Image: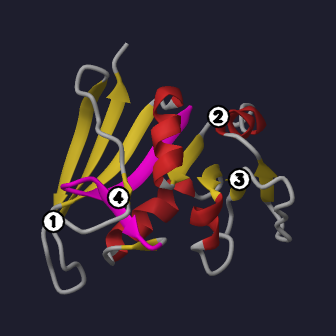
Amino acid sequence: MIVMIAAASENNALGQDNKLLWHLPNDFKRFKKLTTGHFIIMGRKTFESFPKPLPNRTHIIITRDTNYKVRFENCYVVHSLEAALKFAEKEALSFLIGGGEIYKQGLKFTDKIELTRVHDRFEADTFFPEIDATEWKLESSIYHKKDDKHKSAFTYLTYLRRK
């Protein structure tokens, strides 16, 4: 199963200058809980936005640069989304974690979307694709209000592809 996991604002903003636009500690914990022990597929810029590889996950990094090298354990470089999916095909569960272009390309291969909808609007240079209600069914929704650790309210949305 391929699961797309992201946090996007009301205007589908994901980030600006390869940085997140918000700090949501509970969303980080959820991301860690869902992805630990699994393959995470991402673009090069997303990988490079991390201070170091995320622990207990296999990283598949997509780049067009055929000379790109990564010198970390459990990190593999491929040159297309299709190659990443082929690399991960024996895994029961793999996650597409960004960025915007990977989400756009990956939507047609995705079985499930775990979206954290941040209830605010942000200026951004990277966006999450629109979710077409004719293709996706909202399976669950969990609201989290604004508090002292979360400057924006947000909702965890789980979508399943309609059959």
- Separation of disc 4 and disc 2 at Cα? 23 Å
Location of residue 121 (image quadrant)? bottom left
Residue that carries the numbered disc 1 in the rendered image? 120
Where's residue 110, x and y in %?
49, 32
For marks 1 and 4 on the same chain, the one whose residue lies earlier in the sequence = 4
What is the image's colouring? secondary structure
Q: Which residue is mark 3?
A: 63
Q: Magenta segment range?
A: 1-17
Residue type pointed to by label 3: Thr
Give the residue displayed 60% in from the left and 64% down from the top. Answer: 45
Query: Mark 4 against mark 3, which lies toward the viewer?
Result: 3
Residue 4 lies in the magenta-colored region: yes
Residue 159: image quadrant is top left
Vertical placement of residue 1 versus 67, above or below: above
Identify the residue shown where x is 74% and y is 32%: 86
Main structural element of the magenta stretch: helix, strand or loop?
A: strand
Which one is nearer the viewer's eye here, 130 or 110? 130
Circle 3 sits in a helix, a strand or a loop, which is it?
A: loop
Quarter of the rendering occupied by the C terminus: top left
Separation of marks 4 and 3 at Cα, in angstroms? 22 Å
Question: Sequence order check: which comes first, mark 4 or mark 2?
Answer: 4
From the image, state whether disc 3 or disc 1 is nearer to you. 3
The residue labelled by disc 4 is 7
In the displayed structure, would residue 129 be above or below residue 149? above
Mark 4: amino acid: Ala
Q: Of label 3 and label 2, which has the lower sequence position?
A: 3
Labels 3 & 1 near each other (Cβ < 8 A):
no
Which residue is disc 2 drawn over?
92
